[in-house]
Amino acid sequence: MDDLYRDYILDHYKRPRNFGELAPHDLEAHDHNPLCGDEMGVHIRVEEGKIAELRFHGQGCAISQAAASIASDEYIGMPLEALPDLDGDWLIELLGIPISATRRKCALLNLKVMRGAVTGDASWP
Amino acid sequence: METTTTSALDVRADFPIMSREIDGRPLVYLDSAATSQKPASVIEAMDGYYRHSNANVHRGVYRLAQEATDLFEGARARVAAFNGAETETTIFTRNATEAINLVAYAWGREHVGAGDVVLITQMEHHSNIVPWQLLCQDTGAELRYLDVADDGTLSLEQLDEELAGGRVKLAAFAHVSNVLGTINPVAEMVARVRAAGATSLIDGSQGVPQLPVDVGAIDADFYAWTGHKALGPTGIGVLHGRRDVLEAMRPFLGGGDMIRTVDFQESTWNDLPWKFEAGTSMIAEGVGLGAAVDYLGNLDMERVRAHERQLTAYALERLAEIESLRVIGPPDADGRGGVISFELRGVHPHDVAELLDRDNVCIRAGHHCAMPLMRRLGVPATARASFGPYNTRADVDALVDSLGRARDLFGES
């Protein structure tokens, strides 16, 4: 079995959860990774200060798409004020695969977009 | 038709890095369009220069300084002759990007104005786009593009239409596309540009490493290329220019070496080519580039081209065996250089490159510094394999085997 492209990673890549668009939505952001051309947007619906629903969209490599899919279930139900505290290590640990320096931004693009939508801070996690 | 009778090159042993193994397996280097590997003779020439002959050039009266100057200027003469150019009109720059910027600043700011057109193509590398965007933003000129057809070629009819508009001041084209591999008919294009009274620049970064190039026959006003893609070191590029055009130009960068006299308020300029070479030159890099063109000249560029054409034809044939793979660009090897961009359905180019690396197969994934072309092709990125004189059919077989494994891992999507 491949260390990076594990079955669950490929499954999330081919059948991403919470992908598409959301209308209406309360928050949104769109961003890209200029190194590889990956792009990702998110629509978020908020209820009582928590993320009630979200949809990612865009295109990219298996790592960026699977990471967004896996993380999406974690984001749903989360209070908005928890977002700024999420960092890259949180996401890498969630994925459970060895992410090299060259693929780190692939994995973190969804968190960058989420933090951008919620806090307006679009810096890399 | 090009000759196919020439025997394949067998020069892998000339390149020290090719004996490198990673995880006990040999290197399959298929990224020469990004940078080439270097033969031992280039590495030894630079090492020898630093060990035995290092001194600043053009200044010292002592013998060591003369020796360094002779090595550096001797290299320039051989680089010029290699491309059928004159020594005095062969200017060393840092890379092709700097050569194109030299023209955009020193020529462009003097000759291009509001309402003029700078004409380029959709297949250009960013280095032949961004300097013209800056020029047009500064001068109010318009940047226009020739389209790329679905088979990866340009249209001479569209070139004629653009030129007939009467506003084109400068036209700048790639000799060979770094993404599509397309070999453009540059001599024909330059002739049409000149007949319309416009100035021409060819970006030969992918041309010089793999084609016999005669800049006298192409006859462009400017021909720019870079050393590190042509078996030479990084940090050195070349601008060949027409003598009358270069002589009429103002300098690009000011400083030492490019002047004849300096007074408190003004200066006079050195002769060609040094008028455009401010500051201490990249001496070791020049010596290394001289060794690179010696090496390529000994191989004979007709044979290099025949070798890479055969390899490209073989690769196109083998890649066609992979059902879910789509090759982008000209369909046959006669119209393209040793560059093949492709898509593997259901597998992102980044993942393709990562999986191939497991087998030491080095390819490039991404936009290849050609984001407008990616948009034209409707793809976010491509995977790209490219060849050098050291590649063999075994490298192509390794590529195809590794692609098969990548496809199997991802399955059909």
Image (cartoon, coloured by chain):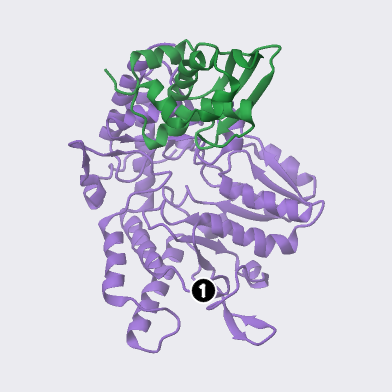
Chain colours: A green, B purple
Q: How many marks?
A: 1
Q: Is residue B158 left or right of residue B289?
A: right
Quadrant in which the N terminus of chain B is drawn: top left
Residue occupying the far left of the picture: B24
From the top left corner, tell me how far across and down residue B77 is, in percent: 43, 70
Q: Is residue B67 left or right of residue A77?
A: left
From the top left corner, tell me how far across and down residue B229 is, in percent: 42, 51
Q: Nearer the viewer, residue A47 or A123?
A: A47
Identify the secondary structure beneath mark 1. Answer: loop
Residue drawn at x 24%, y 45% is B18
Q: Nearer the viewer, residue B109 or A106?
A: A106
Q: Nearer the viewer, residue B373 or A40?
A: A40
From the top left corner, tell me how far across and down residue B367 is, in percent: 52, 36
User: What chain letter is assigned to the residue under label 1?
Assistant: B
From the top left corner, tell me how far across and down residue B296 is, in percent: 35, 55
> Is B365 situated above or below B125?
above
Q: Nearer the viewer, residue A80 or B12?
A: A80
Residue drawn at x 55%, y 59% is B98
Q: Is residue B219 visible?
A: no
Q: Residues within 10 Å of mark 1 (few under 14, many from 20)?
A: few
Quadrant in which the C terminus of chain B is drawn: top left
Residue ID for mark 1: B279
Q: Is residue B269 visible?
A: yes
Q: Amino acid at mark 1?
A: Gly
Residue occupying the far bottom of the picture: B61
